[in-house]
Every structure is written in structure tokens, then in C-alpha cells.
Amino acid sequence: MPEKEHPSLDLLLKEFRSTFGDQELQNVLAKKLRSSKSQKRVLTIVCDEGMHPIPNAAIVGEKFVFSKSPLNIESAHTLQSDLEERVMALSILLQERSWSRIRIVYTGHAILGSLIKHTVYRITHKETEDLVYFGSAGYFQIKFDMRAILTEKRVSKRSSAMP
């Protein structure tokens, strides 16, 4: 391939430095490194991989698949045991490091999302960013600050009840 179409790294650096200066190069590289480090502290949990196509853009940071096989529904006992194993695997991951953000991609049976959300909050005390699937409309990201919502409504309800 011709050098002009795909310049070497040295040529790119030289051109960037002559155009923008050393300080801008340092700023760009530092910003990219900071972004990379913060991405590593983001966890995206997929409830059930294979249920719906999940766009690559939905996966940020580390990906954890909670379920990729059908639930074991031979009996209530086998279902409970199967779900407990999955919760324990998630629990171990959540405790391995301090996550800056936790995202849940909701697919599959509702019990999966419910258990994930509950486990995440019990262990980390963090609210999640939720990606929910609505068929032909695709995925929507929803993020609730439940504490703020509930506190605001409580305050609003009290003030409207006052004479």
C-alpha cells in the first residue's frame, strides 16, 4: 500500500505535532488513556445472551453474560438452584473491583433482570443504567436515580398536603 494512504505512526505524530503542537498531543493522549481506564471500570451485564440481537454499542467496558442457556425448569428446586449459581457468579464479579458504572441489558425472562438488579444493588449500592429492548423500536437506555425520585415525590406530597 502506498505510504501516502496509510502513513506510518512516526509520520502521523510528526504531522499532528506540526499542526497542533506538543501540548495538544499530550492532551489527546492523556484524555484517551483516562477514557480507557474508566471503561475498564464499567460492567455491562447481559441478562440472556442469544434472546435478541444486542448491538455492539450496547456493550461498554467488561461484559458479563448472566445466562446464555435455557433456565432449568424441571422443578422449582432445580430452577432455584440454577438461578442461585448464576447469582453467585455475578456476586463474585461485583466484589472483585470497584465499578464506576454498571449497565444491564434486559433480555430473556423477567426473573433474570430482577435477580441481577437486586444483586447489583445489594452488593454495590449502585443504581444501574438499564438498556431495555422494545422489539422493532430497538433498545432504549433508562437511568433512574431512585433515591432522588422517591425523595422528591415525598417532599412534593408533603408540601401539597400542608395547609
Image (cartoon, rainbow, N blue to C red):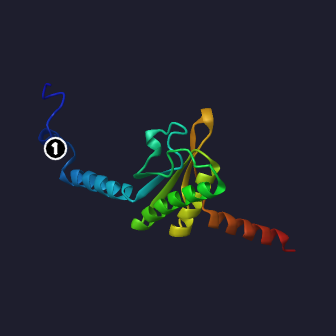
Residue for point 48% across, 60% down: 90
Picture quarter containing residue 132?
A: top right
Residue 38 coordinates in the image, percent (x, y): 37, 58
Report crowding for label 1: few under 14, some 14 to 19, many 20 or more residues within 10 A (C-alpha). Answer: some
Residue closest to the far top: 1
Residue 50 to residue 27: above or below: above
Q: Nearer the viewer, residue 84 or 5?
A: 84
Q: Nearer the viewer, residue 135 or 141?
A: 135
Residue for point 66% across, 63% down: 149
Q: Nearer the viewer, residue 148 or 56?
A: 56
Image quarter in which the N terminus is found: top left
The total of numbered circles placed on residues is 1
Q: Is residue 103 visible?
A: yes
Residue ID for mark 1: 13
Residue closest to the far bottom: 163
Picture quarter containing residue 16?
A: top left
Residue 86 coordinates in the image, percent (x, y): 51, 57
Q: Is residue 143 visible?
A: no
Picture quarter containing residue 140?
A: top right
139 sits left or right of 101 in the view: right
Residue 67 to residue 163: above or below: above
Residue 99 to residue 49: above or below: below
Residue closest to the far right: 163
Residue 108 coordinates in the image, percent (x, y): 59, 44
Q: Which amino acid type is shown beneath numbered disc 1?
A: Leu
Residue 17 coordinates in the image, percent (x, y): 17, 46
Residue for point 15% across, 41% down: 9
